[in-house]
Image (cartoon, rainbow, N blue to C red):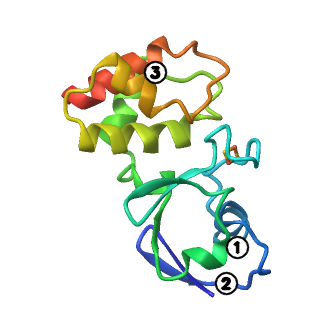
């Protein structure tokens, strides 16, 4: 199949049952997308498919053929962080970093659609992304800052 990730088309061999998250990590070689629960609950595997955040453990790789997939690797420009990444850095919006790729892509989607989100907007947006370290206060502060930057 052909899988377009971050604007680059990859020709990969996948089993019909291969999940998108495994194709991205193992065939394409981009390991920023994390594998957590594999049940659609934690959000660690979040990517963007055709402009919409998607849990890539809940999608077959084959169903993404013809779609534009964006992963966390698309955010930074070399050493220049994306404003959402910079806001998380500035506000200590992560500790272990396991949830971070999914959290950042979800936050980016929110601030692009909602320029001045309330804390409730932010909590609703990230309720599919679990963080076991921060207690969420610094994440909410980071998303607030990202929306204003
Ligand atoms: Fe996909 Fe947890 S690994 S939601």
Rendering coords of residue 4 (x, y %): 49, 77
Task: First in sequence, mark 1 or 3: give its number.
Answer: 1
The answer to which quarter of the image holds residue 83 is top left
> Does the residue at mark 2 contact the one at mark 3 (Cβ under 8 Å)?
no
- The residue identified by callout 1 is 27
* Helix, strand or loop for disc 1: helix
Picture layout, residue 75 above or below residue 12: above
Task: First in sequence, mark 2 or 1: give its number.
Answer: 2
Rendering coords of residue 52 (x, y %): 41, 56
Picture layout, residue 75 above or below residue 102: below
* Closer-to-camera residue (77/56): 56
Distance from the alpha carbon under mark 2 to that under mark 1: 6 Å
The answer to which quarter of the image holds residue 20 is bottom right
> Does the residue at mark 2 contact the one at mark 1 (Cβ under 8 Å)?
yes
Which of the labelled discs sits on residue 139, or is there none? 3
Q: Can residue 81 be seen in this view?
A: no
| Quarter of the image with the C terminus in it | top left
Rendering coords of residue 127 (x, y %): 53, 30
* Helix, strand or loop for disc 2: loop
- The residue identified by callout 2 is 12
Distance from the alpha carbon under mark 2 to that under mark 3: 36 Å
* Helix, strand or loop for disc 3: helix
Rendering coords of residue 85 (x, y %): 39, 36
Distance from the alpha carbon under mark 1 to that under mark 3: 31 Å
Q: In this view, does 131 lie to the left or right of 54?
A: right
| Residue sitting at x 45%, y 39% | 104
* Closer-to-camera residue (16/101): 16
The answer to which quarter of the image holds residue 94 is top right
């Amino acid at each position: 199949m052909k899988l377009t990730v971050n604007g680059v088309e990859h020709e990969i061999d996948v089993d019909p049952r291969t999940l998108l998250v495994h194709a991205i990590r193992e065939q394409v070689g981009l390991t920023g997308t994390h594998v957590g629960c594999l049940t659609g609950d934690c959000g660690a595997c979040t990517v963007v498919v055709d402009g919409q955040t998607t849990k890539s453990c809940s999608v077959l790789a084959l169903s993404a053929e013809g779609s534009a997939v964006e992963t966390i690797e698309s955010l930074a420009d070399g050493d220049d962080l994306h404003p959402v990444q910079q806001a998380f850095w500035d506000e200590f919006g992560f500790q272990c970093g396991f949830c971070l790729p999914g959290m950042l892509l979800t936050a980016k989607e929110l601030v692009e659609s909602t320029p001045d989100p309330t804390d409730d907007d932010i909590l609703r947006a990230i309720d599919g992304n679990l963080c076991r370290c921060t207690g969420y206060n610094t994440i909410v502060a980071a998303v607030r800052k990202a929306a204003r930057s």
